[in-house]
Image (tube, rainbow, N blue to C red):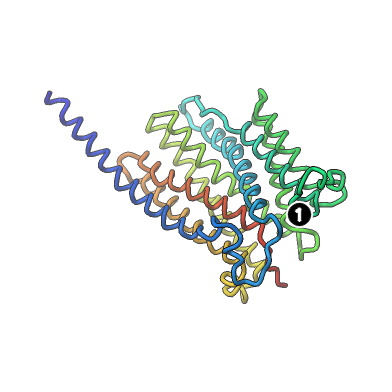
Amino acid sequence: MTSTKPRSGAAGAHRGARRPGAGRAAAVLVLVALAALIPLLGPSPALHGTGEAAAPGTGGIAALRTVLFAALALPVGELFVNRLARSLPGAPPAVPRSWSTAAGAVGFAAALGLASVVATGNLVPGGPADIDVGGLYASRDGKLALLEVNAFLAAALCAASARPVTQAWPLAAVIVAEALRAHPVTEHDPLVGSGLTLVHLLCASLWTGGLLHALRTLRLWGTAEAGAALLGLYARVAAVLLAAVTATGLCSSLRRMPAETILEQLTDTAYGRVLLAKVILTAGVAALALWARVRLARAADPLTACSPARAEVYALGVVVAVSGLLTALPVPIRW
């Protein structure tokens, strides 16, 4: 009897110690999510009062791009974290059930939807008769859309094969196609912009998908030592990824909104408003990541870092949704 009571009290104290952390993580998440109110309500609030007109189907295109980005991040993150796990000496061999095949199939459907929009001259098709599939081969955007469709299909097939690591190649093709699509040849120095977008999208996918898969792996392993080692290894790489995402995002913004006009455009254009929401959200995500890293290094139980890390995953999901809307809004290019 006397031997069980201290353990019960210790367990209760341990559970009580975790509750405030979870509460603070939820509070931070709610606060940063407020910045996403405009994007979550769709393009209309973002465009209100700017004098800009939304292209037909902007909301649908934003949703499809959000799905496409998420479908890209999931398998990229799995490949990344599985590689980190294999590099840890003594780590359990078990890995969570892969979501890559399903992600590839969903990405294929999203890319097919976006290709149908391109095939109708960037208009929402009213029916199959409006879609000119052959016309996709006649334009740069059409070819890139077809590349993304085929690459997601290939990634899904590779993920379901005996060598799922081979999906890295079609996933890389999707990232390259997205980087090229975001910067048409009529833009000033399009290759510079494409290079920035490529690095930004790759690092964001590794960060977002990697954190989700790392938390899934920790839950499967159930051992504090191996789990803390994996989370610590991921955190070190994630710090570099965050720096790269921030630097490339800043450079891309300055290319589209010169420094002398950026403050005005952040409030007076739809693109600027959604970009501002994304910046605020990303700052909140960075704060959660820092909080998790401090807990990982200083807490008696390093796995208490999972609480802010889970909040970080949710916040990153909102950032992905905001990014999807950002790509569908008119870009205020002023050279």
Tell me where residue 264 appears, x and y as whole percent.
59, 75
Tell me where residue 262 appears, x and y as whole percent.
60, 72
The amino acid type found where label 1 is placed reads Leu
Tell me where residue 178 appears, x and y as whole percent.
71, 50
- The quarter of the picture where the C terminus appears is bottom right
- Image point 49% across, 37% down: which residue? 214
| In the displayed structure image, the side of residue 30 where residue 270 appears, left or right | right
Picture quarter containing residue 334?
bottom right
- Image point 48% across, 29% down: which residue? 89
Picture quarter containing residue 329?
bottom right
Q: Residues within 10 Å of mark 1 (few under 14, many from 20)?
A: some
Q: Secondary structure at mark 1?
A: loop
228 in relation to 194, above or below: above
Q: Which residue is mark 1?
A: 123
Q: Residue furthest left?
A: 2
- Image point 59% across, 59% down: which residue? 247
